[in-house]
Amino acid sequence: MALTSLLASIGCLEIFIAIFFFLVFWSLVDNKHGLPRNFLIFGIFPSLLMHIHRIHERSTEVLSRTGGTFLLKGLWSTNMDILGTVDPANVHYIMSANFTNFPKGHELKKIFDAIGDGIFNSDLDLWKNQRKLAREMIIHQRFHKCWVKTNVDKVENGLIPVLEFVAKEGRVLDLQDVFKRLTFDTTCMLLTGFDPDCLSLELAGVPFLKAMDDAKDVCFRLHLLPESVWKLQQWLGFGPEKKLSKAEEVLDQVIGKYISMKCDELSNATKSEEDEEGYDLLTSYMVNDAETKTGLKFDDKFLRDTILNFMFAGHDTVASGLGSSVAHPKIEKKIREELKAMVLLGEGRMESIWGYDASEFKPEIWISDRGTVKHGPAYKFFSFNAGPRTCLAKEVAFTQMKIVASTIIHNYQIEMVEGHTVCPNISAMLYMKHSFKVRIKRR
């Protein structure tokens, strides 16, 4: 009995000591102004670990308290110092006025090695030539016709049947997952000409989508770790690097299959059949003489990297933005009343730039009294980047969001499941951490 009491008292003492040192550590990681404390050896790494679960919100807080610019000191001797800024003047200077002085560089390419030498990872002539090819495709008349038709068909034959089924059955639906499937199908059709048909009544698991999510999550975390640490994990084959390696295998396998199928399709197609087919990136790259014009080598690796880069761009950003358009009842009502798509505000929470209500979701700030879109400087709202790297498919994204959002809001009532919390995940893309659980009702 006495031994039991002694063990219990020792256990309570250990818990008390642990709580005490945790509180001491908590009080030391940030200074009295609420900013990360810079330790001699560890830099701001302790504060980063303390706030890792809410890294996006914490970044906004720190930048707000420092006037929009803050130097993040990394671990000693790790070369991880990062200057973060949202000051419009700085953004304009970096992204536009002195663009050539700020390449993405080798360090970023090492972290995002999974996406290869695509347009997001490249600099100089490699980037210029890829952007030129992509622009020629996007401004082509056949591209716009194909893009609109693809989206309308997928909404009518994919999205609406799923929503009708869920509404009839009264089931809870992960709307974020539906949006990801929808945009993956349409983007894949545009890039390869093939429909993976992920958006179906079964909503079966899609290994490629999971691999993309895993790759984004791991790459984001690599930013927070010293290179020596994740290089060791890569060498030993454990931790996040193991997860990334498995994701890359899936991505390579699926994209490789599409490239092989396209080669077989083109080799067996006649000239008239090629002309009648839809307009996809793989076909435009393989049948044109762009390789000769640009000097790029259109081998399987180049095609793989190109498809994967545009897959991330076309699938992720639109799927993320669509969730915001139906997650706020006030905005849903306005869209339904006017049936006008609104430009989505996904970033830009700085009160010094946007005013006291910057943290509120108010996409109507982009709509004039006449119902037209108000355009602002890209360096103030750079969700679509700014300067020479401005997103080529900005209008393409808006077109898809207009088609999908207007269809849903006009025909269905979206109700978020009671008790469901919405917060951003820790990833390179601002998805909802706990998905978006809703119930669908017919209007």
Image: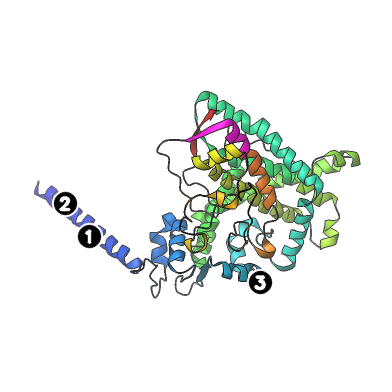
Q: Give the mark nearer the N terminus: 3 vs 2.
A: 2
Q: Give the mark nearer the N terminus: 1 vs 3.
A: 1
Instruction: Tell me whether the residue at label 2 lies in contact with that at label 1, contact meaning CB atoms closer than 8 angstroms.
Output: no
Where residue 264 sits, quadrant-wise, is top right
Q: Residue at x 48, y 37 (%)?
A: 437
Pointer 2 residue? 7
* Mark 1 residue type: Ile
Asked if residue 38 is positioned above or below residue 406 in the image, the reply reads below
Specify whether 411 is left or right of 17.
Answer: right
* Mark 2 residue type: Leu
Asked if residue 26 is positioned above or below residue 398 in the image, the reply reads below
* Mark 3 residue type: Ala
Residue nearest the viewer, comparing 9 with 333: 333
Residue 417 lies in the magenta stretch:
yes
Pointer 3 residue? 97
Residue placed furthest toward the right: 271
Specify whether 421 is left or right of 220.
Answer: left
Q: Which mark is residue 422?
A: none
Residue 319 seen in render: yes
Instruction: Tell me whether the residue at label 1 lies in contact with that at label 3, contact meaning CB atoms closer than 8 angstroms.
Output: no
Magenta stretch bounds? 406-419
Specify whether 229 is left or right of 112.
Answer: left
At which x and y percent is residue 324?
A: 54, 45
At which x and y percent is residue 13?
A: 18, 57
Judge depth for marks 1 and 3 and give the one in front: 3
Q: Residue at x 66, y 71 (%)?
A: 97
Pointer 1 residue? 17
Disc 1 on helix, strand or loop?
helix
Judge depth for marks 3 and 2 and give the one in front: 3
Disc 2 on helix, strand or loop?
helix
